[in-house]
């Protein structure tokens, strides 16, 4: 009886005009957060660090553009899936044929293997920082990852990803503790300045910017 009353109360609250947007927001919050955090891996952190140390504040101008392009790309992918109810691989195969699809996804496979390599290297570095045996620690992380992917379900995986996303709050803490020139940082998001744009700097700017 109590459970039934609780369900009725929840349905009534869900029907309120002010509650519906909140339900919709939290319904997409999990997948959206995980997607947004996907590129913040070990390779990404290393690239950001090198970019910041080499280029300084002007690199923020590229990050603003890249963030916009990434949002557009993800929105396009989501729209394709929602409209066609098919995966990207199926759509590419239908539009460009099997041979082109194989080439594209071969390149994707190579890129993913490189990403996995950087992740495992980061696990090894982390084990050294924690004074843990590197090889067993790497195998443990790999085993946990395989078990989550093969034995877990969508809700479990999403919950794990959301919890691990909390660690990215360390970015904000690190930014505050670094005590940057906030005025210069914000202004460089809209136009790069404050450095001498020599040919060497411009070359590094473009190369590292593409990496970011």
Image (tube, helix red, strand yellow):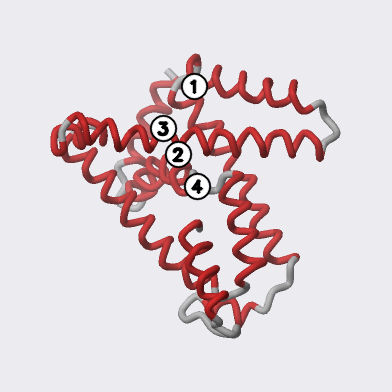
Cα distance, mark 4 to mark 1?
A: 19 Å
Indicate which label's residue lies in the foreground, 3 or 1: 3
Q: Alpha carbon of mark 2 to alpha carbon of mark 4: how far?
A: 13 Å
Asked whether disc 2 touches disc 3, contact meaning CB atoms under 8 Å apart, the reply is yes
Question: Which type of secondary structure does the marked residue at label 4 adopt?
Answer: loop
Q: Are marks 4 and 1 in contact (CB under 8 Å)?
A: no
Residue under the image location 53 percent in, 21 percent down: 148
| Residue drawn at the location 53% of the way across and 32% of the way down | 159
Q: Residue furthest top?
A: 151
> In the image, is residue 204 above or below residue 117?
below
Camera-nearest residue between 27 and 82: 82
Above or below, comparing residue 111 to residue 196 in the picture? above
Residue 1 x, y percent position in the rendering: 42, 17
In the drawing, does residue 172 fall left or right of residue 160?
Answer: right
Q: Earlier in the sequence, mark 2 or mark 4?
A: 4
Q: Which residue is mark 2?
A: 111
- Crowdedness near tag 3: few (<14), some (14–19) or many (≥20) residues, C-alpha within 10 Å: few
- Residue 123 location, x and y as percent? 69, 34
Residue that numbered label 1 is attached to: 149
Measuring from the top left, give residue 113's x and y in whole percent.
50, 33
| Mark 2 neighbour density, 10 Å: few (under 14) some (14–19) many (20 or more) | few
Q: CA distance from mark 2 to mark 1?
A: 19 Å
């Amino acid at each position: 009886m109590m459970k039934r009353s609780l369900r009725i109360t929840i349905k009534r609250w869900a029907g309120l005009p002010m509650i519906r947007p909140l339900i919709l927001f939290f319904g997409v919050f999990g997948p959206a957060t995980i997607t947004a955090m996907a590129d913040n891996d070990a390779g990404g952190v290393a690239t950001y660090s090198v970019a910041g140390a080499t280029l300084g504040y002007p690199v923020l101008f590229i990050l603003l553009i890249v963030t916009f392009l990434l949002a557009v790309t993800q929105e396009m992918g989501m729209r394709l899936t929602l409209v066609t109810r098919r995966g990207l691989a199926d759509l590419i195969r239908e539009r460009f044929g099997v041979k082109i699809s194989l080439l594209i996804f071969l390149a994707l496979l190579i890129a993913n293997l490189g990403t996995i390599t950087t992740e495992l290297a980061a696990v090894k570095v982390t084990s050294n920082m924690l004074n843990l045996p590197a090889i067993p620690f790497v195998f443990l992380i790999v085993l946990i990852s395989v078990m989550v992917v093969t034995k877990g379900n969508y809700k479990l995986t999403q919950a794990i990803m959301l919890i691990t996303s909390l660690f990215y709050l360390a970015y904000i803490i690190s930014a505050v503790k670094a005590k940057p020139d906030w005025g210069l940082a914000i202004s460089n998001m809209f136009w790069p300045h404050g450095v001498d744009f020599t040919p060497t700097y411009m070359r590094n700017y473009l190369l590292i910017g593409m990496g970011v």
